[in-house]
Each structure stands twice: as C-alpha cells, then as structure tokens.
Image (spheres, rainbow, N blue to C red):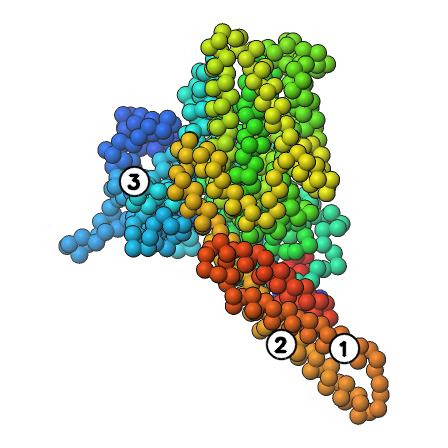
Amino acid sequence: MTHHSDYDVLAAAKNWRTMMPELEKITDIQQIFGVDTFSLDQMREKLSKPVWKSLQATIERGLALDPNVADIAALAMKEWALSKGATHYTHWFQPLTGTTAEKHESFVTPNAGGGAIAEFSGKDLIQGEPDASSFPSGGLRATFEARGYTAWDPTSPAFIVKHSNGATLFIPTAFASWTGDALDYKTPLLRSIEALNKQAMRALQLFGVQTNKVGSTVGAEQEYFLIDEEFFFRRPDLVMSGRTLFGARPPRGQELEDHYFGSIPDRVLSFMTAVETELYRLGVPIKTRHNEVAPAQYELAPIFENSNIAADHQQVVMQVLKNTARRFGLVCLLHEKPFAGVNGSGKHVNWSMSTDTGLNLLEPGDTPHANMQFLFFCTAVIKAVDTYADLLRMSVASAANDHRLGANEAPPAIMSIFLGDQLADVFEQLEKGALRKSKSGGLLGLGTNVLPHLPRHAGDRNRTSPFAFTGNKFEFRAVGSSQSVSFPITVLNTIVAQSINEMTNALQARLKKKESLETALKIILTDTIKKHKRVVFNGDGYEDKWKKEAQKRGLPNRRTSLEAIEQLIQKQHIKVFADHAVLSEREVEARHEIALDQYFKTINIEAETTEWIACTIILPAAHQYIGELAAIAENLAETGIQSKALLRSLQDIVTKTDDLSENLEILKKANRDLGGDTIHSKAYHMRDTVVPAMNKVRAAADELERIIPDKLWSMPTYREMLFVK
Ligand code: ADP
Ligand code: MG
C-alpha cells in the first residue's frame, strides 16, 4: 500500500468500521413510508370536511387557494411539525442556480410578557419574503429591488428534515420577483404541467376519453460516485469544483467491466440502506440500487410520480445522498464528470403522460382504441423532439455536462429518438400508409383489427441514444447528474403540449369537414411522421458515421454547451414558451443570461483552482524531487561513480517540470484576462482560451504524477480514490 507523507490509505480503508453510525433497521417499509411528510392523508385526518374539500380542489384540480383554508391548514401543519420535533420552518425553493434554497424561521415568537409562543399563520405558510438579491435573476430584478416572494405549492407535501440536533419543517414553494417574474425552476414547471393538461385534455376529448386531468410522470435515475472523505478533503479540486482537475489515469479503469451490477461493498450497501430509510421516511419511493459502470460509481432510482413531486423529490434525493455519505466517512460526488477516463454520471429522466386515473398515454396497450391514442401521443413526442431539438439540448447544457455529451461515453449532443425495432416498424408502416397489409396484423381502426402487440419493454436496449422509447415511456438520458430535472421536464411538457395542440387543431379541422376520426387520424399521423422521421435513429449513436448521417438529415449538433445555450433565445423557442404561458420573453432572456453566467463562473473557478494547485502543490513537489535527485547526483559525482539511471530521471523530471511551468504561464495569462466585459464574451473566452490552457496544464501535471515519488505527492491518486472502499 502507498505511503504518502500526509495521509494513510490503509486508515481510509478501515476507519469507517469504527465510525459506523447507529442505523435504524428497517424491516417494514410500509410502517415508515412517508412518516416525515405531511401527506394528503394526514392533512385529511386533521382538517374538517369542507376545508379538506377546498384544499383538495387546489391540490388535485389546480383551483385557486382559499385564504381561510390556508390558516386552518397552517395550524394543522404546525401542530404536526411540532409533534415531530421541528423548531423551525422554511420555505424551500429552487432558484436558478439549479440547487435549492432555504431560510429558516423559528416557530417560536417571543411575546411582550417575556415568554414565547409558537406561531405560524396561513400567511406564513402561503407567502415568504427571502432577500432575492443574492439569487441569480438574469436582469429580472436589479439589486436595489431586492424583493422576492416565495409562494406555497400545496401540490407538493411539506416534510421534516432532521439534523443531529433537531428538525425543520420544509415547505415546497415557488419563487418570484416582486414584478411577478419567475425566479425559479418550479414555477415554469407548474405552468408547463398546466399547458400539457390543457392540450392533452383537448385531444382526449376527441378520442372520447373522460378524465379530469392529464399530467406528466417522471422517474429519474440518479448516478453518483462515492469516495472516502479522507481523500476528498485532500483534493482541493474536488472541494472547490466537484471534479478532479488533475489525476493520471490508473493502470486499471473500467476495462474489466467488473463493476456494473457487481456485488456492492458492505460499507456502500450500508450507506444505500441508510439513504433509502431516510427517503422512505420522506415519502420518496426508491426502488432500485446498483453499481454503475465506473469503479466507485452507483445508481438509485425511484418509482415514477407526477412530475412536480418527482422534481422536488429528485432534489431531496441529491441532498440525502450527500448528507448520508458523511455519516459513513464518505463523500457523494454528483458532478457529471468527477474523474477523467472513466464514465461520467447522468440522470436518466423517464417521462410519460398520464391521466389522473392512471391511464398512461404512452402505453401501447392492446385495444385498437387505446392504440390509436397511443400512436397519436407518441407521434406528438416525435414531432416535438424534432422541432425543438435545440431546446431539449439546451435544457441539459452546462460546463459540467460538456464532459459527457458528445464525448465517447454518453449520449451524443445530437438529439435523436430511439424507438426500438418493433415500434420503428410500426411507424414505418404508418408512414407508408400501408398498415392494412402489415404482417403483424395492422393497426388501430386504421386498417385491420388489432395492432401488433408491442412489448412493454423494447426487446433491445440502446444506451447510446439521448432519447429512447422504453416500453411505455421515453427516457431522456442526456440530463446531467448534478442538475435539477425541472427544466428538462418543463421543456418536454411544453414542446409536447405544442405538438398536441397542432395535431389536435388539424384533427378538429378535418372532423369539421365530416371526415371520420380514423381517416383524419391516419392522414395526420402519416403526414407528421413523414415530416419528422429524420429524428428517429435506431443505430449506434457513438459512431462517427452517425454524426455525418445526422448532418445530412439536417439535425443540429451543438457540441458544446455554449452553442446550446445560445439556442434558448431562438424566436420559435421564445414563442412556444410564451404561447403556452410557461415563460415570458423576459423570463427566457433571463435564463439565457444566467446560463452563460453559470458557464463562465464554473470554468473560471476551475481555472483558478488549476492554477493554484499547480503552483502550490505540484510544482513544489517537482522542485523537491529535482533537488533530491540533484543532491544525489552531486554526492555520486564526488565518488566518481556514474549513474545513467539517475541522470535519465533527472533529465526527465526537469523536462516535464519545464513543460508544466510553460503551460502554467499561459493559463495564468488566460486567467488574468477575462475576455471582455459582456457575459457573452467572457463565456467564450472561457471555452476557447481558458479550457484549452487548463487541459494542457493538466496533461503536463499528470505526466509528473507518473514519475514523482508517492511520498512527495500529497494529493490522493485516482487509484486510491476509485479503488479503496
Ligand atoms: P429501465 O430498466 O428500462 O430503465 P425501469 O422499469 O427500471 O426501466 O424504470 C426506470 C425508471 O422509469 C423508474 O424510475 C420508473 O419508475 C420509471 N418509469 C416507469 N414507468 C414510467 C412512466 N410511465 N412515466 C415515468 N417514468 C416511468
Ligand atoms: Mg434506465
């Protein structure tokens, strides 16, 4: 085992046993599921019938909230929270940083007599007023107009977050400026759910389906890395930027393919169990856990839920992963690419549409009637992804995700749809209008009696597609592991709402002319598929061949996030958000600005950290080694003995150190110059000048790591971080 000057690898491997936390052993998930959330059931128990009915109308049908009801709900919520040991409450919101924000208020208010009473009114529940000036607004709010409001989202249950020394009531809220502009990710998500509801209901009416509400459903699979905290805190790059900015590749990475689905180490399994227990208590229905492809990489996935709750729960999942890891002496890395040379982490967002009675609109089903519907909605998704490929690409753009998308491991930056052989065949038939003759029995009421029985899960799996049909849902795989899923879902909801809108309009127009539903549908679906089939690709998305083919088909390939971010303000994007009242033009422009700013800041921090580490850790180690070798050489020279090995080592380290030093000077210069005054020029300066300079410094430093003695190398290496468990 390696002996570094500053830390003990063996201790890192062993220590956790002595620090294993006392764990709650779960034997009955049902008994603990949701106990730390103020669920609808609990709310119903505590409220009178009329109050409950009124609140239910808000929650289930999106009707405006009655203020009197809020007072009563607040009282019930407070009593419940106090009984759970909560001393504080917080409006919990999702600012445009992509993380969550909380400002805790005590339930207890001192009164004039010197005592204190627990207070929490309907107004406290409904509205909060955090200082908005410290959150990005992209120009929507000047700092002198710092007012921002949080507003209770009664459709997502409040929950209790415990810490070692108490507990806090978390109330999911939306966040807006005093001008009414959305400053968060929740507000547009809620608006997009309404847009989808409106359009899907219109379509369903034509199909004769009675339902109260349609929404999108989401199940997000989360990938993450776990490393010993001893290693983490000795890596300034991980601490500052969430990823390693240096690190020579170990002799073994993931070549052996022995980690994926491999047996899970005890410490990690204990950690996962603790995470699940915590999440069950919070009502998050975690279902699967397993090793991922890279060493030290894992995944967990919940059962799908309505997309607003799924998005909130996804934030909770990330928080619980991070907090729980520390109890096991581990650190959870959610970054898209913490380690070069091994797989990065994504978040597969499984998405579908469903009625409030649980009818999945993307379920192929086996009755012709349902199939007709299925083909309609599935076609709407295909049309949406083709028309708004740039918007989807933008929704996953970040400096961190640039290490995955388009690199040779993750879905490419070209947005395309994988349908699987069977479904692709059905759509080909549809396109040719030859369903009648299909050997699988024809389609819907469009030809013969029965649609080919589509498998719930497409027979083959294709991991290279950014957007794959997987049985009865689509899986958007380009989403980054650390990002909020809200915006990608918002985009999906909005663009599919738009497709459904157009297709429903066309259908209505034909029905007016007394065409039968079957005839009208057949024409519309065939037309739509013809127009948009270019986005369907069932081959290997990693191959260079596909890039050329995609270009021929006219599909955009926004290789870097900056290019993708620029697309947000395209006219048709501003229009689709405005038409469905999801984001105003101002709100879109603000998000564009914030995305550029975040890109700039991320790289700027990485570049300065790179410079710092190179100057204060790596160069000094190299100089020390040079000094040691030179001293030995001098001693040897006195004895008259010649050592070729010594001279070779000395020459090697000197050459490589010079190389690092030269590249470091270039990086320093790039870091001093910010590339101009506008956020636009700064962002491009980062991409075009700073990133290449950083990469060169890293390459030179990684060469040094291979020859400098372990005892002089104070940062934990890849082989330690990835393989010591
Ligand atoms: P796979 O193994 O093909 O990825 P799983 O059945 O394991 O499929 O599901 C992966 C994720 O997709 C889970 O989070 C699951 O709950 C979610 N999912 C399944 N059905 C739907 C649906 N109708 N809408 C949204 N997500 C879904
Ligand atoms: Mg999956």
Q: Amino acid at mark 3?
A: Ile
Q: Tag count in the figure?
A: 3
Identify the element where label 3 is drawn. Answer: helix
Which one is earlier in the sequence, the residue at label 3 or at label 1? Answer: 3
Classify 10 Å Cα crowding around label 1: few (below 14), some (14-19), many (20 and above).
Answer: some
Q: Amino acid at mark 2?
A: Pro
Proximity of marks 2 and 3: CB atoms separated by less than 8 Å = no
Rendering quarter of residue 68: top left
Q: Nearer the viewer, mark 1 or mark 2?
A: 1
Q: Amino acid at mark 1?
A: Gln
Classify 10 Å Cα crowding around label 3: few (below 14), some (14-19), many (20 and above).
Answer: many
- List the residue tagged with mark 3: 126
Which one is earlier in the sequence, the residue at label 1 or at label 2? Answer: 2
User: Which disc is residue 651 wearing?
Assistant: 1
Percent position of residue 260, x then y: 69, 45
Picture quarter with the N terminus: bottom right
Proximity of marks 1 and 2: CB atoms separated by less than 8 Å = no
Q: Nearer the viewer, mark 2 or mark 3?
A: 2
Q: Is residue 143 visible?
A: yes
Q: Which residue is nearer to you in this view: 619 or 597?
A: 597
Work out how far the residue at label 1 is from the one at label 2, CA to CA, in angstroms. Answer: 17 Å
Q: Which residue is nearer to you in this view: 272 or 132?
A: 132
Identify the element where label 1 is drawn. Answer: helix
- List the residue tagged with mark 2: 620
Identify the element where label 2 is drawn. Answer: helix
Percent position of residue 417, x then y: 63, 32
User: Assess mark 2: CB under 8 A from ligand 2?
Assistant: no
Proximity of marks 3 and 1: CB atoms separated by less than 8 Å = no
Percent position of residue 318, x then y: 50, 47
| Farthest-out residue, bottom | 638
Above or below 698: residue 479: above
Q: Residue at x 61, y 47 (%)?
A: 559
